[in-house]
Image (cartoon, rainbow, N blue to C red):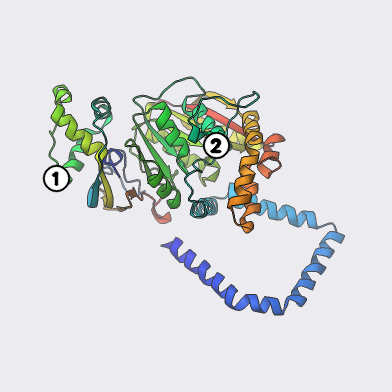
Amino acid sequence: MRLLTHNLLMCNLKTCAGQNFPLALQANEISEENTEFNLVLTQKMLGKLDWKAFHRVADSLGHTLPEELTPEDQNNDELMQRLHHLLFNIVVLSGTLTCQSCGRAYPIDKGIPNMLLEDSEEA
Amino acid sequence: MIEFCLWLVIVVIITAISVIAIPILIITSPLWASTLLVIYLLLKALGLSSIVSNKCSQIYDWLFFKSDKPRKFLWRNFYNALCYMFPQEEWKTMNYGYAVSSETGYMIVLAKEEESERFSYQLYHFMATGFKKTGNLQGQIIVEVGSGRGGGLAYVVRNLKPLSALGVDYSKQQVEFCKRTYTYPNISFVEGDAENLPIKDDSVDMVLNVESCHCYGNFKKFVGEISRVLKSDGRFMLTDFIVADRVPAFEAVLKEFFDISEKKDITPNVLLSLKFDSDRRMELIQNRTPICCRRLLKRFSGSEGSAIYLELESRRSLYLAYNLVKKSS
């Protein structure tokens, strides 16, 4: 699972209300890929990202990012390269995504988050 | 956990049948075979065989197309088994396809490696371009619900260039197949349920759903979920085969959450695709599948003469495509 994907995922448990996004990431195994840096793609992606969620998940992996992203940051080549790396090259192979509101944990195995609910949990 | 227990029970039953029941069945075969024969002849003589056969068809129809939980369970395990049996990467799509009315049925130019599944890719192209109205999806976050073997979504990423694409599917085997087959940096796949999407509100520009919603137990819940995850100006591109009598009820649910921007009856295009593609489908089933599965697979293959082909040809079922716009709240 890339951090790009994490930026869309939430807990959809019927009893869960409020803080069901973003999910807290516990990464047990990470691989790093080597995709070619693409400034335009990274800039476009930043326009669509939930920055707070991305900031928090990057922080949980030990990558400190600015609290807020300013328009000038988009021209900061070093920062853009770091963001590209975080968005596209970091792949979480195993771990868990945990809902901050209800504590439900979703396993990540072979790089795939399992977001399925048990019958009794469905809304 | 419940599913694990269910599978355990099934394995125990099959093992018990293999070890104990089969020898007993063979020894007692003269008794039960003759009894079955007498029952069959009696039913035939009394004209009841068609009633029994109809009842069986009704049970099949209810289980696969009308029930709630059993339908989800059956389709999920059907696709899991299918993907387990056929892990070959050259088979990437699972839909009945779309052909234009011409000598070849061709609508788009494809790469050589895409050619064998041309008509399935054409259906994706037709849907993702909003019925051939847009050339690309640049800047868009798209989600395919029921992404199956992922070939359609990967085609869209390669050719229509969305910003990112997420495939959600109920079948673990299929999601694993997608994860190892498609490695573009902006495509990803998760295990998830169409009726409980694990996607945050108002976050997606376009949702694709191609020949998948007939597998869902609760259609209204699914449509509500799509409406929830789409942005206010988001689009929902939906296509599937539907029994003609059920179209009004189907559309009533859609209209609760969406405005129908455009609707196309693509039944003739799908039938054409199935005609063009029939030999390939039959060859795949004949040469790549165990003999015990062929009858069931032919039923689902859509090849000329199959149950679904006849349904579409007689227009008892229609293949419909919708371009839906989220209703403003």
Front of the two marks 2 and 1: 2
At a point 20% along the width and 34% down the height, the residue shown is A83
Q: Amino acid at mark 2?
A: Ser
Name the residue at the front extreme: B112
Image quarter (top left, top right, bottom left or bottom right) of the N terminus of chain A: top left
- Total labels drawn: 2
Which chain is home to disc 1?
A
Which chain is home to disc 2?
B
Residue B325 to residue A112: above or below? above
Residue A8 lies, in percent from the top left, at 31, 38
Within 10 Å of disc 1 (Cα), the crowding (few <14, some 14-19, many 20+) is: few
Residue A87 lies, in percent from the top left, at 25, 37
Q: Nearer the viewer, residue B108 or A72?
A: B108
Left or right: B103 as drawn, with respect to B165: right
Using the numbered discs, state the Cα–Cα distance from disc 2 to disc 1 in whole angstroms. 46 Å
Left or right: B318 as drawn, with respect to B76: right
Mark 1, residue position:
A62
Residue B231 visible here: yes
Assign a secondary structure to mark 1: loop
At a point 82% along the width and 61% down the height, the residue shown is B43
Residue B223 to residue A114: above or below? above
Mark 2, residue position:
B116
